[in-house]
Image (cartoon, rainbow, N blue to C red):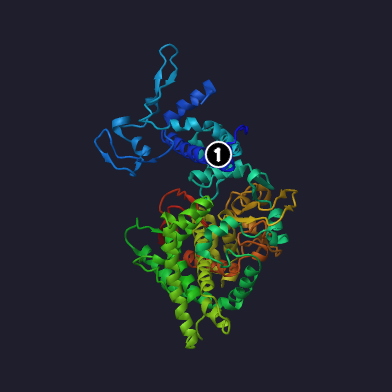
Amino acid sequence: MRRTSLFFDANFNIDEAINPILGAEDILCSTLVWYFWLFLNNPQVEKEIVREILEKRKVIRKWFPQESKQAMENDIWPDATKVKKGTRVLYNIFEMGRLPELWGENWKSERWLERDGRTGDWRFIPRDHIASVSSKAKDLKVMYLLSFRIGWVIKAALGIAYASKLNGGDASLAGMMKINIDGGSIEKRAKAGIGGVTRDERGILKDFTMGILPMAYYDETKETGFLQIRDPSNVKHILKTRFDNYPKESRFTEALSDLFGKGLFLVDGSEWKSQRQFLRHDFYPKEFHAYISVAEEELSGRLVPFLSNIAAQENAATTIDLQNTFSRFIFDVVCRIGFGFDPKYLFPSLPPTPLTDTYKTAVKLSMVRYGTLPLIWKAKKFFNLDSEKRLGLLVDELHKFLGNIIAKKKERLVLMEDLEDKDVFASILRRAQGEQLDETFLLHTAINFILGGLDTSCSALTWFFWLISSNPNVEQEIVREIREKDGLSDMVYTHACIYESMRLYPPVPVDTKEAVEDDVWPDGTKVKKGTSIIFHIFAMRRSPELWGSDWADFRPERWLERRSSGTSSSDDWNFIARDPFTYPVFQAGPRICLGKEIAVLLIKMVAATILKCFRVIPAQDNFSPHYHVLMTSRMKHGFPVRIIERH
């Protein structure tokens, strides 16, 4: 656009930069997703489109689901509705598209077509724009071409072509959807070198792009300073070699600061160092005994009886959501270990879980912030509107609840009634005697503790049991090991299975950083100050260069090697740990997870206890979970299973 007029001032240029993003990227993304979903369910329409593409070599429902207006003066509509000045009016294009009075009873593309009487070809017949309000897009086409990230279009096309090759030339969406989770083995994805993790639309497109990422990194938008990496040498450079140059991304910390505050998860620099030094005492191995005792009590007193009760029910169709069950169990454990407080969420009656619901909703709204332009959510926060108002109420509720627990623990400390208390916060308060700990610091530490214990452990356990249920040979070997070994430390094969499941489905699939100064990475990539960086743990686990051509297979043996005993017994395994920068599931470098050892031990305890007593069977044959990520990965609609007593 040439600057030929004084009307092109700074504000105008900013507005012109923002408007195409609204007018193009979101609208086209929405249209394409629904467009392809409809064809997935209408194979005849898809077939006709493919025929036309092949013959003609050339290639619309609505764009905006609704739009709002405001009346400047009093008015009366054709149907006699009286409208007052200032009234906000929404006309709902989404509903108009479903009115039988306008469109008939069925969805069919032929309503827009008529045959050319001379050639027999289809001819497009536009509708009255009052009935089909999609003409707005015409005004945006030029801006769209200027603003849309063409790189994404190219990558998606390459991914589709690759998947078409995998499916024997089948480039239909149905063919694309075949590239899905397949009982943990995911053989088709292994052959393609790409991964269709889920039936979630964003997940599919994400995996297509991951499949064609260069090994070192790809630069999504150089002009905006955004890099994604999966090369271990670059990861090591960021997480260890130049650790101080790569703090948490400022946009991320700002978006999540109301919830997590200045706790260990978000802070950097000297504040992070002092907090980590102060809290690391509670994660020394000598403290594990108290924590393990709590976990054992919860396992034997609640989880096992709960599952036994389900298994004993005469109705063979009885199912539970294993993900929800683990969430209840882990939350009880985390609260008892962290605060000496028992919420009692894992009871046979499955009581309401107000505290976890509040926490999870607050996390969701905080992550919505991160995906929103800061100017927008900050304005909503300033005026206390919508999601920002709700987030504020949820955070206040969490602070009030946790504040009461902390106040009671302080009272016990003053009265010297806490000498036998083994929880983390009792330890923190005892160590802090003589120095005044800020109340806000304690609240933020409590919420960060829930984050570190609840979400990650629940995620790891859920994906572990799905993969085990999909691989009966692995399950059989774990059960044999559980029955023959004396203790958890001897269960090497089970340990390898846990690490393998977290390789395929890391609880925290991505992490963000931001460059403080200009830098050059080991692969020669030049990084400018202020560049946002995502190191993609999820993508790293799909790299043939890192994990071999069978990277998509659930194969615990990749973590094991035979002892040199000359026997072929399955007892003769040694666990071989990987470079933490190749496997940064627990972070790496100075910021490596403080609770790594206790987390793995807890997962192993739960896995061994359940598999020794029960068989966990997905409620649906060939169950394929929907992969979903907020801060941690989870199954979008839960994991429905049947529980059967093991004999």
Name of the residue lying farthest toward the front: 6
In this rendering, would 40 be left or right of 565? left
Instruction: Residue 564 in the image: state x and y as whole percent.
Output: 71, 63
Q: Secondary structure at mark 1?
A: helix
- Numbered marks: total: 1
Instruction: Residue 379 in the image: state x and y as whole percent.
Output: 48, 54
Q: Which residue is mark 1?
A: 16
Instruction: Residue 300 in the image: state x and y as whole percent.
Output: 44, 73
Vertical relation: 619 (above or below) 45: below
Q: Quadrant of the C terminus?
A: bottom left
Identify the residue shown where x is 60% and y is 69%: 594
Pointer 1 local density, CA inside 10 Å: few below 14, some 14–19, many at least 20: few
Vertical relation: 127 (above or below) 31: above
In this rendering, would 563 be left or right of 356? right
Q: Is residue 542 visible?
A: yes
Name of the residue lying farthest toward the left: 80
Identify the residue shown where x is 49% and y is 24%: 51
Q: Amino acid at mark 1?
A: Glu
In this rendering, would 7 be left or right of 215? left
Instruction: Residue 57 in the image: state x and y as whole percent.
Output: 54, 23
Identify the residue shown where x is 47% and y is 67%: 330
Nearer to us in this view, 618 or 138: 138
Q: Is residue 104 visible?
A: no
